[in-house]
Amino acid sequence: MGEGPVVLHAVVVGVDRYRDPRIADLSWARRDAEAVAELVEQVHPSQRRVTLLLDEEATRRNVHVEIGERLAGEATEDDLVLLYFACHGSPETSPGPNGVDRYLVLHDTEYDHVYATGLSMERELPWLFERITGPPLVVLLVDACFSGRAGGRTFEGPRLRAARASDRAGGTVSLSELELGEGRLMVGACDDDQVARESAELGHGVFTHYLLKGPSAADEGFTVGVHRLYEEVAAAVAEHTGGRQVPVINGRSARARLPYLW
């Protein structure tokens, strides 16, 4: 282990506005990301590195640069990494064994080419995680959904829609079954067949609203276990939505703790 202080590295992404007019804009994803960045910025400036990518800044290239280059080069074995995305998610056909991948839809994602211009949860995110070799813990928070259903932060990719219409669509792997590697945890806003809801009343995505409220109290040492954080947020989201939206968690780590920011 190094001798310097622990640094929390965060890349926070929020997309309300999409370049492609065929992708519906969102209402509260940008505000979600801004609020999460404000939460992380409670850490002393010498112990945090926060990159906030909003709307036009939240391109596929910029996400790759921030995670795959900057974090890979700067984050050490003493540090923690937090990644947060508030945006659309899209299921779309892929050449992989399951026939369907999930994509985070960034500002410059093209509706007709989600496979080429979105960020694949199955292929690209694990690859980006592999590049972050130093930190023992990387936590990914996703306020998006991948059901393709109307009414939330998702849309169905056009090729998958056509395949489903002709009964040629493949299967998919559950979010809770993605292989992210040791020390990599993901908390998603909802299960695969559900919708990640936005709420004008709350002024946020429902998942992010309760994430920002945080756990009821800190654990010993002014930290909070990621699994405990998940359990409290998931219970609150499920209660708020009458069980129609239930967050999921995936991954494994022997050191799954974050600073208590609330």
Image: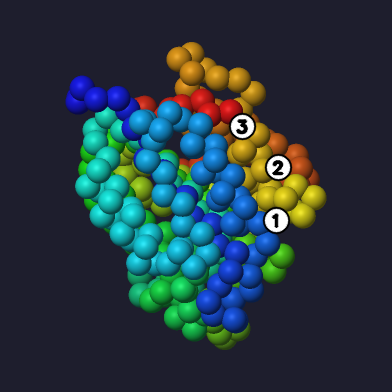
Query: Which residue was labeled with disc 2?
Result: 238
Q: Please tell me the numbered disc located at residue 198.
A: 1
Q: Residue at x 49, y 68 (%)?
A: 56
Give whichever of discs 2 and 3 has the lower sequence position.
3
Q: Nearer the viewer, residue 95 or 119?
A: 119
Image coordinates of residue 71 in percent, x first then y, are 29, 47
- Give the amino acid at mark 2: Ala
- Local crowd at mark 1 within 10 Å, few (<14), some, or many (≥20)? many
Q: Is residue 200 left or right of residue 123?
A: right
**Label 1 to label 2: alpha-carbon separation:** 14 Å
Q: Nearer the viewer, residue 258 or 75?
A: 75
- Local crowd at mark 3 within 10 Å, few (<14), some, or many (≥20)? some
Image coordinates of residue 99 in percent, x first then y, are 42, 72
Q: Is residue 14 left or right of residue 198?
A: left
Whether residue 130 appears in this view of the structure is: no
The image quadrant where one finds the N terminus is top left
Q: Find residue 151 and report its image quarter.
A: bottom right
Q: Residue at x 61, y 39 (%)?
A: 211
Farthest residue toward the front? 45
The image quadrant where one finds the C terminus is top right
Farthest residue toward the top? 220
Query: Which residue was labeled with disc 3?
Result: 214
